[in-house]
Amino acid sequence: MPEVISQDGTTIVYDRSGAGPALILIDGAMCHRSAGPMQALATLLTDHFTVYTYDRRGRGESGDTAPYAPEREAEDVQALIAEAGGTAYLYAMSSGGAVALRTPGAAGVVLYEPPFGLGSREYTDRLRELLAAGSNGDAVALFMRNVGVPEPVVTGMRNQPGFASVEAIAPTLAYDDELLTEMPADQGVPLLVVSGSASPESLQKAARMTAEAFPGADHRTLEGQTHDVQPAALAPVLIDFLRNAGAGPR
């Protein structure tokens, strides 16, 4: 697989497909190239963009380097932008939005339901306690409950054979939690924040709050969509904004 080396020496593995302006897709919590929504979305975008999907540090085939800091993830994306020729659009899902907003040099940014303002000290403390104890499965279960997954579903997932692969990237939950502690500074690039009308009101409110925090940013609601947005509903919005409205700084 192709790879880039981030500023701190971490190897970041990626896939590239399509033709056109570069577009980097940034996953949310617990997702990577082989487990998440980005591959399906990428297939709908390759007629319009050269699409980059990658494993965020600590996930999939990418490496990781201690100590963690949110700036390191922005540097990972900057390494991909450089690989793409020095300019790229960014699309980020959920907590990945905090990575996109921290990354300078993007030509335009689209975020789907970045969950700023939804954390709690109780969750942060308990998550770090479980991870420090090596209780990765319990940390994943805590995260799932925190985002509203019913207890029977959590129990069922823990009994599945594939749960071990989820436990392996549990330490990155602390990364996402740290990323969301504060709103990044305005990079002055075209920005669209999208939410789903069927998502919990807390996520819709967080999306609106994020758009309001950046002068000139747009907000759009996708009717009938939840936090698990359907690629077919999202792709036209990305294409329209990034190819038509995303030219030039705000």
Image: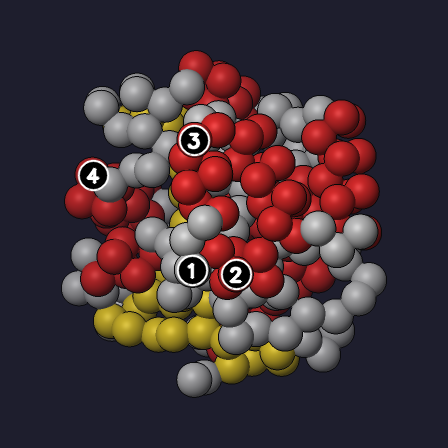
Q: Amino acid at mark 3?
A: Pro
C-alpha span from label 1 to label 3: 17 Å
C-alpha span from label 2 to label 3: 18 Å
Relative to the observer, which residue lies in front, 202 or 127?
127
Question: In percent of the image, x 74 and y 70: which residue is there?
Answer: 65
**Label 4: element kind:** helix
Answer few, some or many: residues within 10 Å of disc 1's Cα (few below 14, many 20 plus, some between 14 and 19): few
State the quadrant of the N terminus.
Answer: bottom left
Dot label at residue 233: 4
Question: In percent of the image, x 76 and y 35: which residue is there?
Answer: 126
Q: Amino acid at mark 1?
A: Pro
Q: Amino acid at mark 2?
A: Ala
Dot label at residue 13: none
Check if mark 4's residue and mark 1's residue have beta carbons within 8 Å: no
Say which quarter of the image contains residue 142: top right
Q: Which residue is mark 1?
A: 161
C-alpha span from label 4 to label 3: 29 Å
Residue 111 sits above or below residue 133 on the image: above
Earlier residue among tags 4 and 3: 3
Earlier residue among tags 4 and 2: 2
Q: Is residue 184 visible?
A: no
Residue 123 sits above or below residue 32 on the image: above
Say which quarter of the image contains residue 77: bottom right
Check if mark 1's residue and mark 2's residue have beta carbons within 8 Å: yes
Check if mark 4's residue and mark 2's residue have beta carbons within 8 Å: no
Relative to the observer, which residue lies in front, 152 or 37?
152
Q: x, y percentage for residue 38? A: 34, 56
Answer few, some or many: residues within 10 Å of disc 4's Cα (few below 14, many 20 plus, some between 14 and 19): some
Residue 201 sits above or below residue 195 on the image: above
Relative to the observer, which residue lies in front, 116 or 130?
130
Q: x, y percentage for residue 36? A: 38, 54
